Image (spheres, rainbow, N blue to C red):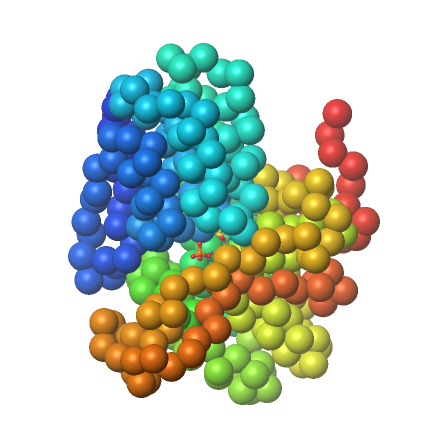
Amino acid sequence: MSGATALRWRPGCLELLDQRALPAAERWLPHSTAAEVAASIRDMVVRGAPAIGITAAYGLALTRWSGEDRAAADRALRASRPTAVNLAWALDRLIGVPDAALAEVAGQLWAEDRAANEAMGAQAAHLLTGGVLTICNTGALATGGHGTALGVVRSARAAGAAVEVFALETRPYLQGARLTAWECARDGIPCTLLTDGMAGALMASGRVHAVIVGCDRVAANGDTANKIGTYGLAVLAQAHGLPFYVAMPTSTLDRATPTAAQIPIESRPADELRRLGGALICPADTPVWNPGFDLTPAKLVTAWLTEHGVWRLPFPAPAA
Ligand code: MRU
């Protein structure tokens, strides 16, 4: 398992590794209120669907010490980022839990996520060989540990497969360049960086055998919301005859949402796109379209990799 971790907890204080500062600095930010935690989720101090679910659970737990209204804190945390269903998954699990037990249950969710990722890796490792293309960051930083798509890579390598990662830089927030390349470097996973626009040429070169991505919400019919750029990768993968895998802990499956049409897509600030490393890269008032996620129709997905096995449609019924 990777040594990287996105959060640290002690009673009354949640520390988040500031992912905005990576890889230049490893800076931990303390949080003592749910409001601070909601702001940090929104501002992407912590990001990645499972990691923000676990973070939100600890955010709610902080109300025991901060004295904030628990219902208001729950609302603010749920609204902090709209696309990832793991926020609701985690906070729903805390409904009815006594204040004094919230932190303990948050810790259970954290352990559950880590275990699910390791189980997913064990179930899906056999699918990967050679070069695999991925987008965004789906590793330990985005989860409770090990990672989803990057976790399957980790598991495949641990099982002896010579898997190497091709990481898209993932404009505009650069999760691929800043976070995936950082995680791979620290864990000894071979990783080659490319810009998002190079994906088609890479596939045509024959250097990758599969595409593997994470997800923020999967609808009941398999339509998949994930980092902007994922849809284009799925289309390209189909055009090149490559398998397209979605690593999906079942905490990210939203059976209550029938299709992609009902998934809310987060709109990110214009300056995230207009600026690179703080410097303007276009006229300051250039109109910008900056959705954080896109929707990949289920028909473009080869399989969804879960902690219970490799799933194809229709998804199995939930365990009783
Ligand atoms: O905007 P981000 O960085 O939170 O987006 C993250 C992703 O799109 C991931 O693929 C997804 O959350 C799964 S992380 C295991």
The residue at the far front in this view is 285
Say which of 86 and 43 sits in front.
43
Q: Specify the quadrant that holds the N terminus.
A: top left
Q: Quadrant of residue 110?
A: top left
Q: Quadrant of residue 318?
A: top right
Say which of 303 and 86 sits in front.
86
The residue at the far right in this view is 314
Q: Percent position (x, y) of residue 192?
A: 40, 74
User: In the displayed structure, does residue 72 sit left or right of residue 244?
Assistant: left
Identified at 72% across, 67% down, the residue is 300
* Image mark count: 0
Q: Percent position (x, y) of residue 140?
A: 40, 48
Say which of 78 and 220 sits in front.
78
Against 6, residue 129 (above or below) is: below
Q: Percent position (x, y) of residue 137?
A: 43, 59
User: In the displayed structure, does residue 41 sit left or right of residue 301?
Assistant: left
User: In the displayed structure, does residue 173 sit left or right of residue 65?
Assistant: right
Against 127, residue 240 (above or below) is: below
Identified at 73% across, 60% down, the residue is 298
Q: Percent position (x, y) of residue 211?
A: 58, 68
Q: Specify the quadrant that holds the C terminus.
A: top right
Q: Is residue 247 visible?
A: no
Identified at 45% across, 25% down, the residue is 71
Against 150, residue 209 (above or below) is: below
Identified at 46% across, 48% down, the residue is 81
Q: Is residue 271 visible?
A: yes
